[in-house]
Image (spheres, helix red, strand yellow):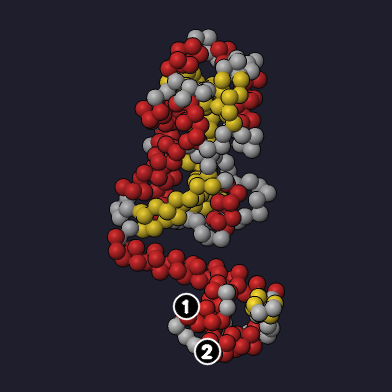
Amino acid sequence: MKHLNYTHLLYFWTVVREGGVAAAARSLNLTPQTISGQLKLLEAQLQGALFEKQGRRLVPTELGRIAYAYSEEIFSRGLELASVLRGARTVGRRPVSIGIADAVPKLLTWRILEPLLRASPPFQLVCHEAPLAGLLADLAAHRLDLVLSTNALPADSGIKAYSHLLGESELGLFGVATLARKLKRGFPQSVDGAPMLLPTERSPNRRSLEGWFEAQQVRPSIAAELDDSALVKTFAQQGVGVFAAPLAIEREIVHAYGVQLIGKVEGLKARFYVLSTERRIKHPAVAIIREQAQTGLFNRETA
């Protein structure tokens, strides 16, 4: 098969999106006869029908559904490229699309990404927060340049991507002043029965914390289970419970949320990764993030 005629493919894509030939003709400022003629040429090239009639409607055939899935990717990315290039010419910033797993603390996300805003020229950040599984699918489809995560890439993910360790941080337990004053005395045994804000069961941090509680022979009272790190801090500000957070951002947490450090979770460390499709880092944003995190953010505890 020769190379596809992308004009024909564009007409087909528009017909599906607009819901019919007449609507596509109006959208493209063409006659319906022109659209129909180009569709027939595309069907001849693909050696199969792209549409079938259901009542008065045209719906894609199996071949049409396959063609539409690819054309959606092609033309959506084309529109995105045009937008990116316009933005790059206008403001001189380098666009970078970043996925942020919802378990990554917001303050830590800011500290990791902030060097990109100070780069020369600075990057234009497009950030998407979601559960890790969905972000990995977007990374594999090249809709994202990188993903920030508390986990390395799962071995059974089936996605061709690579995990680059940014650093690790000891954990601490934090709470409002009234809770902190009470629980600092006799820590960590004082945590027994204390109200606790924990990640949900799908988080590996949950299992790590439960292992630590068991080792300390304490059983806190679970006040709430929350995946969103910002929601955890919001609950904690209201005195609902105690939460665990990386000591690498201790100062920021104390200042931003009005809580106090109760004590260190000895023996536990949180790890943070940037995931990308590159085994050897070439993307400038990934390189900057990793270098600055390793030499700055995650060096603060020992500096």
The image position of residue 34, as x and y in percent, is 52, 89
The image position of residue 162, as x and y in percent, is 56, 51
Residue located 53% across and 42% down the image: 102
The image position of residue 258, as x and y in percent, is 39, 24
Q: Amino acid at mark 1?
A: Ser
Instruction: Point out the residue furthest to the front here.
Output: 56
Q: Mark 1 sits on what residue?
A: 27
SS at circle 2 = helix
SS at circle 1 = helix
Q: Disc 1 or 2, which lies upstream in sequence?
A: 1
Can residue 78 be seen?
yes
Q: Amino acid at mark 2?
A: Thr
Q: Is residue 277 above or below residue 224?
A: below
Instruction: Point out the residue furthest to the top here.
Output: 186
Residue located 52% across and 27% down the image: 244
Can residue 251 be seen?
no
